[in-house]
Amino acid sequence: MAFLKANFLPLSGMANSDAPRHWSYKTADSHATAVASGYFNDAAATLSLKQGDLIHSVEATGGTETLSTIFVDAISAAGVVTVLSSVQTLA
């Protein structure tokens, strides 16, 4: 699957601040897919995702949901988003 803009929602509204913004996201994609380089490109292009933002994401891995904290590590001049993450399996 691909990034779903409808499932990507702001949890904070610090648009005029240098503080990181927090986002919520849920997808049926696996964790590996969601943290692949470029997955969040559309969020950077259309929703003002920026370097240093945090994404609290629920993904599906083999039918088991995982909870991830995803850190936006970099956004290239071409708009490619690179992230770092930690993941926990929900039981």
Image (tube, rainbow, N blue to C red):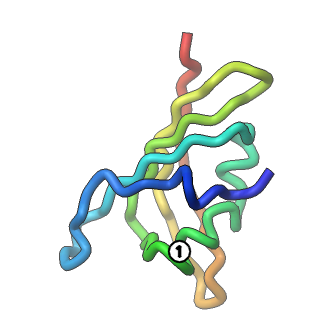
Farthest residue to the bottom: give it.
Answer: 77
Residue type of the residue flagged with mark 1: Ala
Q: Position of residue 76 (x, y in %)?
A: 59, 82
Residue 86 visible, this angle: no
In front of the other: 5 or 42: 5
- Residue sitting at 71 percent across and 37 percent down? 28
Give the image location of residue 32, x and y in percent: 73, 43
Give SS at disc 1. helix
- The residue depicted at 63 percent of the width and 35 percent of the height is 59
Q: Residue drawn 47% across and 73% down?
A: 47
Give above or below for 68 relative to 76. Answer: above
Percent across and percent down for residue 17 are 19, 74
Which quadrant of the view contains residue 89?
A: top right
- Residue at 67 percent of width and 49 percent of height: 34
Which residue carries the number 1 mark? 44
Relative placement, left or right, of 80 versus 90 is: right
Furthest residue toward top: 91
